[in-house]
Each structure stands twice: as structure tokens, then as C-alpha cells.
Image (cartoon, rainbow, N blue to C red):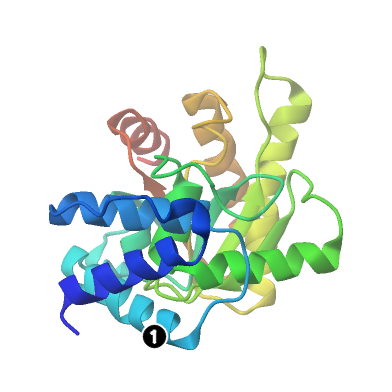
Amino acid sequence: MTQSERLLYLIKYLINETGDLKTIDIPIDNTAQKRLLRSLVNIRPPKPISPKFLAVQNAYLQEEQRKKGVISLADLSPVQPGIYLWQGDITRLSTDAIVNAANSAMLGCFVPCHRCIDNAIHSAAGVELRLECAHIMAHQKTEESIGKAKITKAYNLPCRYVLHTVGPIIHRKVTKEACDLLSRCYHSCLELAEAYQLKSVAFCCISTGEFHFPNKKAAEIAVQTVQDYRKKNQNRLEVVFNVFKDIDYEIYKQLLE
């Protein structure tokens, strides 16, 4: 199959999977088709899927990943010993693990093409990531608590694993409890990475998007927690602070340099 043929196959499979979507018209434009596929994947519940779909999906996503390009630690320069700062799409990083800012359901974002990191990671990884998360949550039988961390495979992402953590939501003022919980998110991910003997992990800006944690305060907590952990444990786990917005890049740059 060509990449265009894979794209159409995946769209048609997901449309035909349920009768509710059979009236959807498939656009001719390639960009619109890609957006439709992502939307269909986003709204799909975690249920069994055919091996052929997975094979076609994996070939499609891996080719899309190749086009985007992969960023390794060798492409970056440390701003402090063992600590890096990189602005860009976290789904391009080939660190041992990347961190996903999840919600308490831990199943990924169901809003079609939403701009959150949870949506981006699940979309690039493929439907198996939601299936694995659903398996974890079915076994856990309760929502994920704030400040903890879970690990899954990364599937079609260039990293090896995804660490999922639920950050605190800020409604009005930033409380000490919220700060402590955010610090715990970073600490839990570092502990889990060390338990799996990982050598590198990339953090997104946990809680600063839809959860409304102030960017500067969140960055201060992130940097302090990582620095304290590395100093206390004297480990060689390398950490990438991944940012997407210019404002976050400037904040982290000032804190780290």
C-alpha cells in the first residue's frame, strides 16, 4: 500500500466499524483526510481491533514519524549536566520515555484533534496505547490519583515508553497542596523511570495547559524537583524539559541557565 492507500483504508475501517459514522463523507484533500483519521482515532473507545488494521496503522504512523523526523539526545546540548531543554513536538523525541500529562480516566483525550499533549501522544502512538491504558485501569478499578505515574509501551512513537501522570487542576489560586502534588508528579515519574532502569526521560509542562497551573510556578517546581532528585539519588538519568510554547521556553531557559 502507498501512504495514501493506507490513510483511506484506516478511515474506511473506522467509519464502517460503527453504524453511527457511515454517513460521513471522506474529503478529497489529504490534509483533511489526516484530520478525519485523527478524529476517528480520538473518539474510538478501547475495544478489540483487527490485526490487519494494526498492521496498516503501524506502517502509516511510522512513515508519518519518518517524515516528521526524530530527535535524539545526541541532537541536543545540555544546559546543565544531564539536563536538556528542547522546544518542539514531544512525539519526535527518542528518549527512553516521554511523559504524558494525562487525566484521571487515563484513556487519552476523546476530543477530536484537541491540542492537548494527551491527544498528541495517543494520536501518534496509535490505538494500542488506549487499549493498554484501558487494561491498566480495568485492573486498577478506580481513577488515577493526582501525583502518581504509570508506564506503558510507546508503540509507534520513537521513544520506548510513555509515563502517564495526572497533574493538579487549578481553579482559582495556587495552593501549597497543588504545588506539592505537581512536584509529586515529577518525582513519581523519575522514580518509575529509575525502577525500569531507563537512562533518559522527557517531561512535558505538566498541568500548565487545560489544568491552568501558572507556567512560571510550574516550571520552578519542575526544575527544582528534578535537580533535587538527581542530586539526592546521584543517578545518571538524563532529563529533557520539553516545551512547545515560546513563553515556556523563555521561562525554562532563565531557570536553567
Q: Residue furthest right?
A: 141
- Using the image, determine if residue 205 lies above or below residue 39: above
Residue 121, can we see it? no
Residue 177: percent from left, percent from top: 78, 28
Residue 42: percent from left, percent from top: 47, 53
| Position of residue 182 in the picture relative to residue 238 (left or right) | right
x 85%, y 53%: residue? 142
| Position of residue 68 in the picture relative to residue 23 (left or right) | left
Could you say which is closer to the camera, residue 21 or residue 137?
21
- Using the image, determine if residue 233 lies above or below residue 165: below
Residue 195, can we see it? yes
x 39%, y 40%: residue? 115
x 69%, y 64%: residue? 134
| Position of residue 11 in the picture relative to residue 195 (left or right) | left
Could you say which is closer to the camera, residue 35 or residue 238?
35
The mark total stands at 1
Residue on which the image places disc 1:
55
Could you say which is closer to the camera, residue 113 or residue 12?
12
Three-letter amino acid code at disc 1? Ala
Instruction: Give the crowd class for mark 1: few <14, some 14-19, many >=20 residues within 10 Å.
Output: few
- Which part of the image, by quadrant, shows the C terminus? top left
Q: Determine the secondary structure under disc 1.
A: helix
- Which part of the image, by quadrant, shows the N terminus? bottom left
| Position of residue 49 in the picture relative to residue 76 (left or right) | right
Residue 245: percent from left, percent from top: 32, 34
Could you say which is closer to the camera, residue 127 or residue 249?
127
x 16%, y 71%: residue? 4
- Using the image, determine if residue 58 lies above or below residue 162: below
